[in-house]
């Protein structure tokens, strides 16, 4: 039974940029990603986003702008009758020794606390496109899944031995379809 799915944002839900997504205007969804989140919602599965957003710590944009980008994402989801239940972000500069920047598990611990769920006792898929997403998910007790959008194709080539057996999907839509298919088999 899946009650929660955790997603990375940039490269999974929306197109990523080496220059960072610094404004709502720069935020553009990857085709099929918003529909995939809405499918999870319709299946009664909660959706959380755990995202490194060091652009704030680097002073490329401020916290208010990050909130406007997240608001645009939520508004775009409404047209598909979808929503994200919780968004957590690490806004620290990479040089800060925080506990929330992936590959550390702080964002996942925030999500676990919010939903009162033990990832080690539940099946919680965490979908990402970078090695740090996968490592944080695994360390937190989630099941990491890789998508080939964003940095996913490069990440696939650098998978560590502990991640060699993870499932890989073309994009978020394909990953969600597979999760929902598994769920329907479990319920039959």
Image: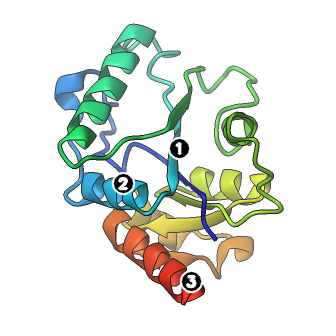
- In this view, 107 is above or below 142: above
The x and y percentages for residue 65 are 34, 14
Instruction: Quarter of the image for the N terminus: give it.
Output: bottom right
- The residue wearing badge 2 is 37
How would you rate the neighbour count of disc 1 (Cα within 10 Å): few for under 14, some for 14-19, many for 20 or more? many
Disc 2 on helix, strand or loop?
helix
Looking at the image, which residue is at 37% across and 63% down?
A: 172
Q: Could you give the CA–CA distance between mark 1 and mark 2, rounded to whole angstroms?
A: 10 Å
Which residue is under mark 1? 48
Give the left or right position of residue 96, taking residue 174 as reference. Answer: right
Taking 181 as reference, is 57 left or right?
Answer: right
**Quarter of the image holding residue 101?**
top right
Q: Position of residue 15 (x, y in %)?
A: 27, 46
Q: Nearer the viewer, residue 57 or 114?
A: 114
Image spot of residue 9 (x, y percent): 42, 43
Please report the residue visible at 19 percent of the width from the left and 57 percent of the height from the top.
31
Q: Are marks 1 and 2 in contact (CB under 8 Å)?
A: no
Which of the pair 155/180 is nearer the observer? Answer: 180
Q: Name the residue located 16 percent from the left edge and 25 percent from the top edge.
A: 25
For the point 43% across and 63% down, the residue is: 43
Mark 3 surroundings within 10 Å by alpha-carbon count, few (fewer than 14), some (14 through 19), many (20 or more): few
Q: Nearer the viewer, residue 131 or 25?
A: 25
The mark that comes first in sequence, 3 or 1, is: 1
Residue 158 can be seen, yes or no: yes
| Sooner in the amino-acid sequence: mark 3 or mark 2 | 2
Residue pointed to by mark 3: 187
The answer for how far apart the CA atoms under marks 3 and 2 are is 20 Å
**What percent of the width, then of the height, locates residue 12?**
38, 53
Of badges 3 and 1, the one in the foreground is 3
Q: CA distance from mark 3 to mark 1?
A: 23 Å
């Amino acid at each position: 039974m899946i009650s929660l799915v955790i997603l990375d944002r940039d490269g999974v839900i929306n197109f990523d940029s080496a220059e960072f997504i610094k404004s709502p205007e720069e935020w553009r969804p990857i085709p099929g990603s918003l529909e995939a989140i809405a499918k999870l919602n319709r299946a009664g599965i909660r959706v959380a986003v755990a995202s490194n957003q060091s652009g704030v710590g680097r002073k490329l944009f401020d916290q208010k702008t990050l909130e406007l980008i997240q608001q645009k994402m939520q508004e775009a989801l409404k047209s598909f009758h979808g929503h994200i239940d919780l968004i957590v972000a690490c806004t620290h500069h990479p040089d800060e020794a925080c506990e929330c920047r992936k590959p550390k598990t702080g964002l996942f611990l925030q999500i676990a606390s919010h939903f009162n769920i033990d990832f080690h006792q539940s099946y919680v898929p965490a979908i990402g496109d970078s090695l740090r997403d996968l490592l944080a998910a695994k360390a937190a007790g989630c099941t990491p899944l890789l998508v080939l959008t964003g940095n996913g194709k490069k990440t696939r080539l650098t998978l560590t031995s502990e991640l060699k057996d993870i499932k890989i999907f073309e994009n978020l839509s394909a990953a969600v379809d597979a999760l929902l298919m598994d769920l329907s088999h479990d319920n039959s």
